[in-house]
Amino acid sequence: MTVRALIVDDEAPARSELRYLLQAHSGVKVVGEAASAAEAIELTRELDYDVVFLDVEMPGASGLETAPHIHERREPPAIVFVTAHAEYAVDAFAVEAFDYLLKPVDPERLARVVERLSERSHENAAPVDKVPVVAGAGTELLDPDQIHYAHAEGDYSRVHTYDRAYLCTSSLGELEDRLGPRFARIHRSYLVNLAKVAGVRRASDRFRLQLADEARTELDVSRRQSREVRERLGL
C-alpha cells in the first residue's frame, strides 16, 4: 500500500531535500507541497494523503498551530514534524504528532518513520480496534486514543485513561501488538501512548516521562528502551 505524503515547509530547499529523500522509498508518493500553513490547510480539502511532513517554524501560523486543523479531517493523516529545533519535541507530541524529525533529516531515521507509516496504513485499512476492559459487572470498549498508559498486572494488564483505571484481560504484550506504533514499551511493565506525553524529566542516569493525565503520572524509562524512546520523542 502506497503512503501518500504532503510536505509543508516555507523554505523551498528544505522541501526539495525531503522530497529527494522520500523518493528513495518506493512505498511513498509525494502528492503535494505547501509553503505555509494556509496553503497546507487549503490542500487538505483538495488532496487525499496519509501523512504530512510539517515544519514547525513558518511565517504566520506555526506547524504546532496548524496541526489541530489537520486533525479536523474525518480521517486525519499522520503528522510528522520536521524542524531544526529539538526543544519542540514535547510540544509536538502534545498535539498528537506521529513522529518528529530533526533537520538535517537523517536518512536512516526517516526510513524508520516510513516503515512505521506503512504499518499504520495497513492498520487503517482495517476496522478500528477497540480495547475491551472490565467496567463494573460488564465490559466497556475503549478507543486507543483514550488510553494514556497501561501496566502489567500478572497475566492481565491495567489500562489507564485520563482519570480512571480498568482491568484488561489482555497481557501487556498482547496490548502492545493491538495498539500499534503510537504506543511505546518504555519498560517491561509499562506501555505508553506517546501522544499523551506532556513532559520529560531527568532522573540520575535515566529519564522519566510525565503524562497528561489528571494525576500527571510520571514513569521511568528503562535503560534498555531509552534509546528508542528518545528517538521517537526527538530527544
Image (tube, grey):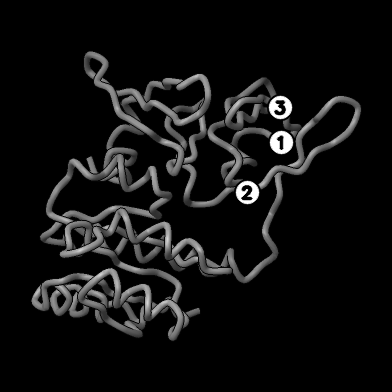
Q: Are marks 1 and 2 in contact (CB under 8 Å)?
A: yes
Q: Are marks 2 and 3 in contact (CB under 8 Å)?
A: no
Residue visible at 25% across and 78% down? 34
Q: In this view, does 70 lie to the left or right of 230?
A: right
Looking at the image, residue 105 lies above or below residue 159: below
Which circle marks residue 170 in the picture? Answer: 1
Residue depth check, mark 3 versus mark 1: number of the one nearer the observer: 3
Which circle marks residue 127 in the picture? Answer: none
Give, as a three-letter code, the residue at label 1.
Answer: Ser
Residue visible at 61% across and 46% down? 144
Measured as percent of width and height from the top left, residue 121 is found at 52, 69
Which circle marks residue 166 in the picture? Answer: 3
- Mark 2: which secondary structure? helix
**Residue 59's image quarter?**
bottom left
Dot 3: few (<14), some (14–19), or many (≥20) neighbours within 10 Å? some
Does residue 27 appear in this view?
no
Residue wearing tag 2: 178
Does residue 134 appear in this view?
yes
